[in-house]
């Protein structure tokens, strides 16, 4: 019985000695012995005495002492006479011995399990308190660093990661009870430096280790939120329903479940916590109100202000998707003001810049479809990109932001019929200086492809062979990320137009557009690009059919159907007007067509498109050719 209790309390049996007896020579030196109450030590020593006559004389005697301990009574002396009387009673009543033994076994098991559970919980709580101090130190250090004037944060990040390594060593030294709290502390640390994937992994491990307290649940909910927003910004802007549904399934449902497990508790402002939850649910208005309330309560809370800016930008995106550009701009200007306030509070916080840059880059891309980009707006955006990059030059998103500014500037020049070569050259130099061949960020890859696609288009306009830049822009077609598909599809269209102009069948290239757009056709892109691109492909097929003396009418009809869909989706985009003008030109060139009628139709669509975007070179060139 003593050996069983020893194993239950300390996790191992006493060491056997000679003649099969139990040794208590080192009974007081084992791990955990000093944590046992003195009465338990006394009972164990008594039960494990070397000489049997010195041990408890019976199970009933041992059970009596255990009962007294459990009920908080002092242990009593057991004179031999008294024990003798007990033994005589047992001898006369054999059933009592069995009952006492079974009761003793149950008491030992109950005491051992209960005591070990209590001790483990106590040690876990102590470890959590100690590690919480390390976590707060990490978060406090980062907060102070981000409040400093604009500077390179990499040394601070390196110091944080060094502390994380030390923390891992501390966790190992504290034993099994510290594993759950330790993974939670590491998760909070990685969350602080913006490594959401590593944070989620550590927090999940804390949960698996049984450390399932409200703070861990809330941290898991927030980690899923962070990953969702990192991945969904572009998908939401492009209206990628399939991608958004996949992200919701992967992160949003889990985030809400863990927030529910937290029971309203969180390690940050309650209103800010609720704002995150409402943001996950897609309730931008409610999230905005809660973020503002959180900032009113804690006017130093940068996260509250960035959360406000993010909610305002989301409301702007919703308007922009519907083509309500005036209302979208109003929301974006409010988002800009909130982001500026966040940067004033934390001048070296990357997140305070990213929230602003998300809507700025989206707005610039949309503006290219329905108007001219304000040069001052692009200068301000580029300056914000450079400031963000100075905080952490190794952040792929910061690199991608600066590269995309160059893409947009080159695109604007091309749309205006101007030479984009200098801007493209500068962008390629930036790409080579800021990235490595192993970079995997999809936005950086898209920028690289776009530089070469724009170069190829400029070469074609000037009668030069665009094959070399097109080869890079088209690549091998092995693009799995949906963000690469738009660029690939447009590069393939450009190559198909070039092949048609050179008298080559464009069908093989156009056939490649199907897998390129396979992941896109289920979504409605905000600028209506997909329908316009598919219409353009049909128009190129019509051109090849005419060259071969075949009927081009079916292809023209399909092209017009796609163009109308694009126009219905966003009547303020210039793309469908340009495509419809080309379609009228194709109709005019059909054998036996009423050329005058279709040329007038072409001019009408050109005029309507130029009313939206006066300097759009593709429409302007169509207008000149129709007059000729």
Image (cartoon, rainbow, N blue to C red):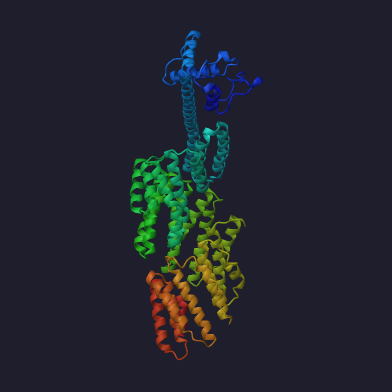
* Pick the front one: 206 or 111: 111
Residue 90 horizontal/vertical position (percent): 48, 16
* Pick the front one: 144 or 203: 203
Q: Is residue 380 visible?
A: no
Question: Farthest residue in the right direction?
Answer: 18
Residue 290 horizontal/vertical position (percent): 34, 47
Residue drawn at x 44%, y 54% is 249
* Pick the front one: 567 or 377: 567
* Pick the front one: 297 or 65: 65
Instruction: Answer with the quarter of the image where residue 511 lies.
Output: bottom right
Residue drawn at x 54%, y 70% is 491
Instruction: Answer with the quarter of the image where residue 609 lies.
Output: bottom left
Residue drawn at x 45%, y 39% is 212
Q: Is residue 432 visible?
A: yes
Residue 246 horizontal/vertical position (percent): 46, 57
Instruction: Answer with the quarter of the image where residue 64 lies.
Output: top left
- Residue 364 lies left or right of residue 50; in this view the side is left
Label total for image: 0
Question: Farthest residue in the bottom direction?
Answer: 592
């Amino acid at each position: 019985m003593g050996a069983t209790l020893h194993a239950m309390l300390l996790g191992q049996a006493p060491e056997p000695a000679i003649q099969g007896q139990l040794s208590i020579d080192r009974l007081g030196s084992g791990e955990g012995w000093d944590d046992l109450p003195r009465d338990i030590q006394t009972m164990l020593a008594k039960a494990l005495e070397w000489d049997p006559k010195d041990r408890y004389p019976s199970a009933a005697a041992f059970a009596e002492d255990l009962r007294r301990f459990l009920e908080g009574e002092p242990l009593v002396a057991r004179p031999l006479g008294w024990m003798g009387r007990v033994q005589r009673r047992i001898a006369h009543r054999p059933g009592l011995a069995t009952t006492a033994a079974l009761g003793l076994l149950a008491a030992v098991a109950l005491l051992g399990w209960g005591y070990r559970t209590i001790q483990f919980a106590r040690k876990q709580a102590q470890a959590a308190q100690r590690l919480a101090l390390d976590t707060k130190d990490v978060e406090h250090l980062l907060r102070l660093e981000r409040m400093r004037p604009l500077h390179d944060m990499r040394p601070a990040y390196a110091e944080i990661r060094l502390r994380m390594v030390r923390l891992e060593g501390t966790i190992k030294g504290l034993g099994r009870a510290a594993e759950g709290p330790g993974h939670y502390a590491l998760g909070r640390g990685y969350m602080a430096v913006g490594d959401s994937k590593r944070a989620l992994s550590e927090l999940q491990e804390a949960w698996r280790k049984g450390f399932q307290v409200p703070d861990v649940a809330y941290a898991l909910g927030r980690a899923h939120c962070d990953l969702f927003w990192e991945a969904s910004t572009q998908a939401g802007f492009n209206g990628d329903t399939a991608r958004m549904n996949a992200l919701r399934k992967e992160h949003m449902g889990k985030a809400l479940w863990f927030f529910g497990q937290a029971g309203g508790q969180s390690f940050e402002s309650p209103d800010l916590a609720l704002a995150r939850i409402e943001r996950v649910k897609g309730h931008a208005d409610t999230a905005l109100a809660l973020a503002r309330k959180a900032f009113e309560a804690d006017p130093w809370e940068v996260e509250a202000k960035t959360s406000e800016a993010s909610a305002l930008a989301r409301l702007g995106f919703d308007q922009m998707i519907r083509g309500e550009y005036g209302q979208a701009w109003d929301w974006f200007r409010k988002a800009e003001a909130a982001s500026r306030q966040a940067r004033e509070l934390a001048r070296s916080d990357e997140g305070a810049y990213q929230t602003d840059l998300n809507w700025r880059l989206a707005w610039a891309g949309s503006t290219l479809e329905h108007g001219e980009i304000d040069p001052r707006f692009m200068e301000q955006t580029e300056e914000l990109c450079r400031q963000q990059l100075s905080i952490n030059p190794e952040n792929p998103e910061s690199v991608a932001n600066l590269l995309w500014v160059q893409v947009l500037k080159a695109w604007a020049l091309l749309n205006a019929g101007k030479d984009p070569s200098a801007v493209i050259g500068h962008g390629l130099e930036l790409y080579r200086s800021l990235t490595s061949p192993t970079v995997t960020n999809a936005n950086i890859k898209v920028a690289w492809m776009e530089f070469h696609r724009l170069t190829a288009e400029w070469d074609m306009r000037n009668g030069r062979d665009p094959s070399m830049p097109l080869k890079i822009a088209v690549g091998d077609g092995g693009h799995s990320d949906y963000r690469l598909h738009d660029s690939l599809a447009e590069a393939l269209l450009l190559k198909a137009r070039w092949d048609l102009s050179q008298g080559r069948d464009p069908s093989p290239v156009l056939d490649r557009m199907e897998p390129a757009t396979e992941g896109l056709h289920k979504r409605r892109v905000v600028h209506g690009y997909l329908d316009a691109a598919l219409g353009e492909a049909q128009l190129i097929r019509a051109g090849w059919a005419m060259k071969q003396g075949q009927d081009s009418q079916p292809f023209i009809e399909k092209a017009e159907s796609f163009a109308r869909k694009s126009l219905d989706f966003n009547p303020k985009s210039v793309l469908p007007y340009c495509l419809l003008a080309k379609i009228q030109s194709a109709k005019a060139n059909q054998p036996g067509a009423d050329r005058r009628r279709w040329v007038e139709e072409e001019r009408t669509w050109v005029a309507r498109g130029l009313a939206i975007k006066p300097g759009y070179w593709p429409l302007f060139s169509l207008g000149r050719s129709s007059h000729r």
